[in-house]
Each structure stands twice: as C-alpha cells, then as structure tokens.
C-alpha cells in the first residue's frame, strides 16, 4: 500500500456520524450494536467499518509487520463484532506491545507527512548538507592559502 493510501486511511477513513444507527445483532438474548461513544473512548486508532459491521485497529492493520500481523486475528485481520466482549477485547488490544509499536509508527508516519521539516530523515539530510557546506568552506580556505603561497613563491614545507 502506498504512503498516500495509508495517509488517506489514517486521516480520512469513513467515520459514522454521531447519530448513526448501527445495525443490531441478537447476542445472548439481547439486541447489541456498536456504539459511537466507543470511538471517542478508545481514541483515534479504533475505526468502524460499516460494510463489515465491525471495528478495527487502523494502526495495527497498517503498520504491523506482515509476519506479526498474520498472528493477530481480531481487530487486525478480521473485524471485532462481539459487542458484549468490547471492554475485554479492546482493553487487552490497547495494552499489547505490538499495538503500542504500531501506534508509534503511525504517529511518526503522520508527522513525517504533515510536518516534513521535523522528520528524522529531513533532519539528518539537513545535518549532512550543513557538514558538506562546512567542509567546502574549509577546502576553499586551504586552496586560497596554497594559491597565495604559490604566487608569492613561498615554500609549503614545514620547518622540520
């Protein structure tokens, strides 16, 4: 998936309206459905898919390594739909180290796209460019000194 597609999914994914009526399922003798408040409670990483009627962790889905992603299962490879286990499943997922790593990767990705001047690679490129400029100035000074000595017939050897 390209960086543009990842950015679009992170920033402009299809989010239901506050008054959206979610489809209900009969689970354990009760009518249960997804709640909009869960999106606000969990944070920006939890997204709802209306076509699959389920919730996903967008960070883990986009930024987990493929070898690790294949083992993750619910909320990453297929939607979370067992609404009566919401607090258990979502809470455990939020505490997983792989989720924390994916969250950091997503945050760094967004920062590199939205503020490229503060990205690590940009800062390293700027440091390299500054170092090259400094070295060019030093070489230019040495070359001017050698040319001056050559014009004045001054030897370049030291005293020893």
Image (cartoon, grey):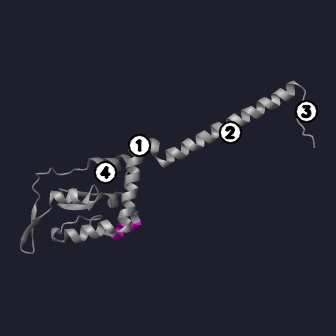
Identify the residue at horizontal 49%, vertical 49% (top origin).
120
Q: Distance between the residues labelled 4 and 3?
A: 67 Å
Do the numbered discs 3 and 1 sit on residues whose CB atoms are within 8 Å? no
Name the residue nearer the viewer: 82 or 86.
86
**Disc 2 element:** helix
**Disc 4 element:** helix
Name the residue nearer the viewer: 17 or 144.
144
Q: Position of residue 43 (x, y in %)?
A: 26, 57
Which residue matches tag 2? Answer: 135
Name the residue nearer the viewer: 66 or 145.
145
Quadrant assignment for the C terminus = top right
Q: Does the magenta stretch include residue 68?
A: yes
Mark 4 or 3 closer to N-term? 4
| 112 on left or right of 128 | left
Identify the residue at horizontal 29%, vertical 70% (top origin).
92
Q: Distance between the residues labelled 4 and 1?
A: 15 Å
Which residue matches tag 4? Answer: 10
Dominant secondary structure, magenta? helix
Mark 4 or 1 closer to N-term? 4
**Disc 3 element:** loop
Q: Position of residue 18 (x, y in %)?
A: 14, 51
Numbered range of the magenta stretch: 67-71
Residue 115: give its label: 1
Mark 1 or 2 closer to N-term? 1
Q: Distance between the residues labelled 3 and 1?
A: 54 Å
Classify residue 157 by image quadrant: top right
Which residue matches tag 3? Answer: 155
């Amino acid at each position: 998936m390209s960086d543009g597609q990842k950015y679009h999914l992170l920033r402009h994914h299809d989010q239901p309206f506050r008054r959206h009526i979610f489809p209900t399922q009969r689970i354990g003798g009760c009518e249960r459905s997804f709640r909009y408040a869960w999106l606000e409670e969990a944070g920006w990483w939890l997204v709802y898919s209306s076509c699959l009627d389920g919730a996903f962790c967008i960070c883990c889905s986009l930024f987990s390594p493929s070898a690790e992603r294949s083992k993750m299962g619910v909320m990453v490879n297929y939607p979370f739909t067992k609404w009566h286990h919401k607090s258990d499943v979502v809470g455990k997922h939020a505490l997983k180290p792989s989720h924390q790593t994916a969250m950091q990767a997503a945050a760094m990705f967004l920062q590199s796209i939205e503020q490229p001047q503060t990205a690590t690679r940009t800062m390293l490129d700027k440091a390299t460019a500054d170092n090259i400029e400094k070295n060019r100035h030093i070489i230019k000074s040495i070359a001017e000194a050698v040319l001056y000595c050559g014009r004045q017939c001054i030897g370049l050897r030291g005293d020893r």
